[in-house]
Amino acid sequence: MSGTAEEPWGRVADDGTVYLRTDEGERAIGSWQVGDPEGALAFFRRKYDALALEVDLLASRVESGILAPDDAHNALRRERRNLAGAQAIGDLGALSARLDQLEEVIAGRRAERRTERKRQLEEARSAKSAIADEAAALASGSDWRHGVGRFRELLEQWKALPRLDKQTDDELWRRFSSARTSYTRRRKQHFSELNVRREDARQVKEALAAEAEALADSTDWGRGTTQFRTLMQRWKAAGPAARDVEDQLWKRFRAAQDRFFNARNAAFAEQDAEYRANLEQKEALLVEAEALLPVRDHRAAREAYRSLLARWDQIGRVPRDSVRTVEGRLRKVEEAIRSAESNEWRRTNPETRARANDTLSQLRNSIADLERELEAQQAKGDVTGERRAQEALDARRAWLAEVEKTLDEFSG
């Protein structure tokens, strides 16, 4: 090898030694004995790009809040170690400054978490106090229908809240538990008196069954459906009659309801039959649309599709059970045309493909390094280190899948 090469951040000497320039001066980072000196600079610049990518990934995870502060701090220390002896040519000082900024962000996040924890505990205290107050109000009331459900909701809310200091938590729990016990006792007494009301329920449901029978032969499908829904709501609100009477009245009510809805469904079926002619026309248009595939001239295909779509809209409705099928077939043609238009645009943009290829290479190298790190952590039995390595590896693999997908689309 002979010759030299240099750039603002490094150079290759006559003897093949590769130097990195920093604010503190030059330091040797490698030797390049075979090939073009410019190739040496390019090689070490790529190593710098890989370091910059790692810093960018860390910054993205820190700034987005994906990493917990402790995990973020450990990852930042690891990146600092990587920079300390990096054999790469580039502005390592800028990467170090970036890490300094991230360290400030992490410190801020830790402070935010402490503040948030304090706020959450105060909110939990207020929430539990409100639960106890509401429980006391329920216990002194007589909402027997909804009160049990509300007490259940309050209990679930209580369980979902964090614990407070023992004295405060125990005091608030005693208030809530005592109110619930009092409510339960009064409710039991209420329902012991409920039998006298069952006769009223029988009379109401007798009238509801008669209304349902009078409505069963209606052909006003919209109004009838609404009325049957209202009758059902009134039925539920009436409360239970004696079991044997309840079963008999329910059979009458349900039979009238079934007669109405069976007739409505039959009418809808006849309406669907009227739509079958429309279906035949749309299926003929689908054959014409699908003949545009595969799309070779996206502009001509788009123009033909617009004309076809105008005729499609003029035809009108098809049977309900065919809507999804015909619309799905039409949508596939639209998607194929749109895809052809997108592919044409991408094929005219080689810069994007080049960047994706470069990112793909860097990601694969990064994944290989992380896989080795994961194996090392597993061998040591370091559960924390293994988890962190696995998280980093999963993130790289997800990114790799996105890049590979992009490259596949370029090749389409």
Image (cartoon, rainbow, N blue to C red):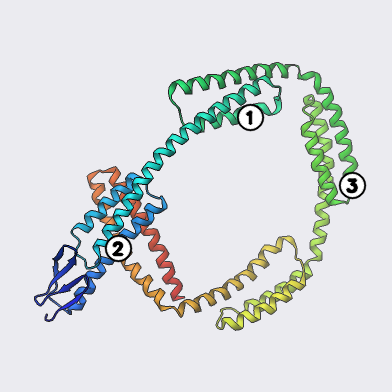
| Res. 41 image quadrant | bottom left
Q: On residue 217, which mark appears?
A: 3
Residue appearing at x 64%, y 19% in the figure: 184
Q: On residue 150, which mark appears?
A: 1
Closer-to-camera residue (327/310): 310
| Res. 129 image quadrant | top right
Q: Residues within 10 Å of mark 1 (few under 14, many from 20)?
A: some
In the rendered image, residue 392, in percent from the top left (x then y), is placed at 33, 53
Residue appearing at x 22%, y 58% in the figure: 83
Identify the residue under disc 2: 52
Residue 25 at least partly seen: yes
Q: CA distance from mark 3 to mark 1?
A: 41 Å
| Res. 355 image quadrant | bottom left
Q: CA distance from mark 3 to mark 2?
A: 76 Å
Q: On residue 237, which mark appears?
A: none
Q: Is residue 346 above or below residue 264?
A: below
User: Of all residues shown, which one is farthest toward the front?
Assistant: 23
Q: CA distance from mark 2 to mark 1?
A: 56 Å
Q: Earlier in the sequence, mark 3 or mark 1?
A: 1
Secondary structure category for the residue under label 1: helix
In the rendered image, residue 308, in percent from the top left (x then y), is placed at 69, 77
From the viewer's perspective, tell me whether residue 78 is left or right of residue 399.
Answer: left
Q: Residues within 10 Å of mark 2 (few under 14, many from 20)?
A: some
Residue 161 at least partly seen: no
Residue type at mark 3: give it. Asp
Residue type at mark 2: give it. Ala
